[in-house]
Amino acid sequence: MVNNLAGFLPYLQGFLTPQRQERFESVLEHRTRHLCVVLENLTKPHNTSAVLRSCDCFGVQNVHMVERDCDSKVDKQISLGSHKWLTTQIWNTEQASAENQVNIDEDPTVICLSTLKSQGYCIVAATPHETQKSLYDLSIDTPIALLFGSEKKGISAPALELADECITVPMYGFTESFNLSVCAALCLSELVRQLHNSDMDWHLSESEKDELRLQWAKRTIPNIEAIERRFYSTGFAE
Amino acid sequence: MVNNLAGFLPYLQGFLTPQRQERFESVLEHRTRHLCVVLENLTKPHNTSAVLRSCDCFGVQNVHMVERDCDSKVDKQISLGSHKWLTTQIWNTEQASAENQVNIDEDPTVICLSTLKSQGYCIVAATPHETQKSLYDLSIDTPIALLFGSEKKGISAPALELADECITVPMYGFTESFNLSVCAALCLSELVRQLHNSDMDWHLSESEKDELRLQWAKRTIPNIEAIERRFYSTGFAE
């Protein structure tokens, strides 16, 4: 389908209002893959959903959800549909074994984090327990995968072993940790602000933008299946 | 009781470990009333609780909860007990009329905000709808009461009318607002960071600290009622 993007995307864009297309472009201008988020075994849908909503708000496109002992459920009242604009990937044992032909016993966290490391991401674990290093001292020079652990158990031992850095958000009270979705938002806010103020190239490439233009158009246009069938059956496709 | 503080507080401190007393002091060093938070008619206990937890984490001592159409419930799994270290005040029609002898028909939001204004607070409403002014352009020169509205209806019209400023947290995605507890944490994080970096006197006074030392000791020591009775009946009290 990507081969046909050149024809299909402009065709689909004809179904979008100019306002909607402008919105896509202004959101795309702030989208990044220089940061991504990994949620390990989150058990509370309202946390997962609030993190997804924050990722959309801050322009962080990719969210990885590891499910070893849980299903990633999204609370739509909290996510406000934000997940449909993001690129989310579920990592569980079944999916990992099907897609990557790995040993079914292998830990999906390990597979997820190893994959991200091989893509050049620095794994940064947000944990108040393992470090005194502040979020505000983290360098954004390399791509960062921000790792958050489950509400009760925190980040798993194998995940901590794969982490390149651990950070904490400075706290001044009695409570020993922020709420998970609050912690994620504080991290994203700071790192995105640093990115915006830097002269690094943190934007999506034009081909990445085209893929999202297509994905978003397809999620916006009613009766997209019929439109797609018509396009490919009437010779519009190359 | 404040008159007896000089005698009762040192007596109570004898029941606390040195570690606990040091913890109190280090938390007190970061406590402030230069910022406070007003929650207007929040309906979701997990939001109220996450905001309370963030206030404790950031050292913001006072939280006002207006209840016109709701009861402020706290989800203890989310607040993690943070509310017991804070000074919280409920504003509803009954309480307002009993304490301040005002007209029972008067809006508790109006009473709460008018009281805070008379105490010198600048009311700053966090709302993405009313303004383009960024959180990051807000001056912390005067004491600030940060106002957050209910999850569905937002900030009420009478509250907006009393607000001195409206601010928004910059967003770059499709979603039109942050989750309420996320928004509150982002605001607190930024303003507290500015306070810490300023040379303003944002700390509590010594007498305010003494009141909290007493309050926290009483909430920490088991069988405090019996200890208090014994103190006042055996002539320790002046």
Image (cartoon, coloured by chain):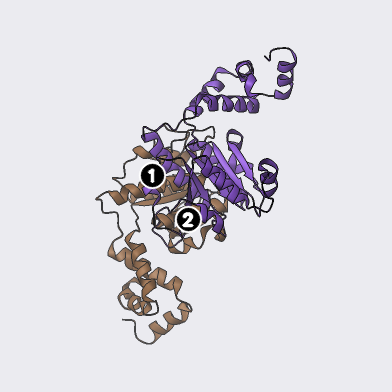
Chain colours: A purple, B brown
Apparent side of residue B236 relative to residue A90 in the rendered image (left or right): left
**Residue drawn at (38%, 87%) of the image:** B234
Mark 2 highlights which residue? Answer: A127
Position of residue B175 in the picture relative to residue A11 (left or right): left
Relative vertical location of residue B222 with respect to residue A20 in this rendering, above or below: below
Q: Are marks 1 and 2 in contact (CB under 8 Å)?
A: no
* Mark found first going from the N terminus, 1 or 2: 2
Q: CA distance from mark 1 to mark 2?
A: 17 Å
Which is nearer the eye, A183 or B91?
Answer: A183
Quadrant (top left, top right, bottom left, bottom right) of the C terminus of chain B = bottom left
Q: Residue A50: image x %, image y %?
A: 55, 45
Badge 2: residue crowd in 10 Å (few <14, some 14–19, many ≥20): many
Occupied quadrant, residue A228: top right
Residue found 35% across the figure and 80% down from its top: B11
**Res B162 visible:** yes
**Vertical arrangement, residue A193 with respect to residue B213, above or below:** above
Q: Amino acid at mark 2?
A: Thr
The residue labelled by disc 1 is A139
Instruction: Give the residue at the far top of this rendering.
Output: A235
Crowdedness near tag 1: few (<14), some (14–19) or many (≥20) residues, C-alpha within 10 Å: few
Residue in the foreground of this view, choosing between B137 and A168: A168
Q: Chain of mark 2?
A: A
x and y percentages locating residue A131 in the rendered image: 42, 58
User: Closest to the observer: B209 or A162?
Assistant: A162
Label 2: element kind: loop
Mark 1 residue type: Ser
